[in-house]
Amino acid sequence: MQALLGFLGEPWDPAVLEHDRRPHDISTYYGSFSAERRQTAQEQTAIYRSRVGAHRREMDPVLRTLFHLRSGAMLRRLGYS
């Protein structure tokens, strides 16, 4: 983990080794994040139509190409086009 964080330019914190025993704010963050997206989309369901295909609009074209090169075969096997 130290090597990974060093590679990413992040500071080392021994707490990363206790991740499963520490409180996290992800549910609060995700709740507000998804509520904002639902409000923007004017949809209140858990899955909303405006996000379908969002990767095509929002993902960097080079990253999208690399992703498809790496995972395209698996996505096709799983029924994604």
Image (tube, rainbow, N blue to C red):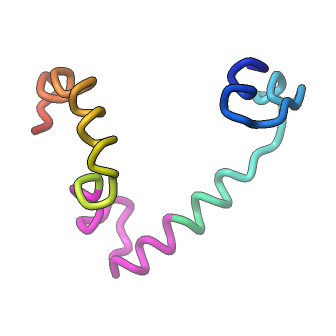
Q: Report x, y in % for residue 78.
A: 17, 27
Question: Is 35 within the magenta?
Answer: yes
- Left or right, 68 with respect to 22, comes to left
Q: Report x, y in % for residue 47.
A: 33, 59
- Left or right, 50 with respect to 37, comes to left
| Residue 37 higher or lower than 55, as above or below | below
Residue at 66% across, 33% down: 8
Residue at 27% across, 23% down: 70
Q: How many marks?
A: 0
Residue at 40% across, 80% down: 40
Residue 22 sits in quarter: top right
Q: Report x, y in % for residue 38.
A: 41, 73
| Residue 26 higher or lower than 6, as above or below | below
- Left or right, 22 with respect to 31, comes to right
Q: Quick one: 41 or 73, which is closer to the camera?
A: 73
Which stretch is magenta? 34-54
Residue at 33% across, 76% down: 43
| Residue 36 higher or lower than 27, as above or below | below
Residue 39 sits in quarter: bottom left
Q: Report x, y in % for residue 6.
A: 75, 26
Quadrant for the N terminus in the image: top right
Residue 45 sits in quarter: bottom left
Quadrant for the C terminus in the image: top left
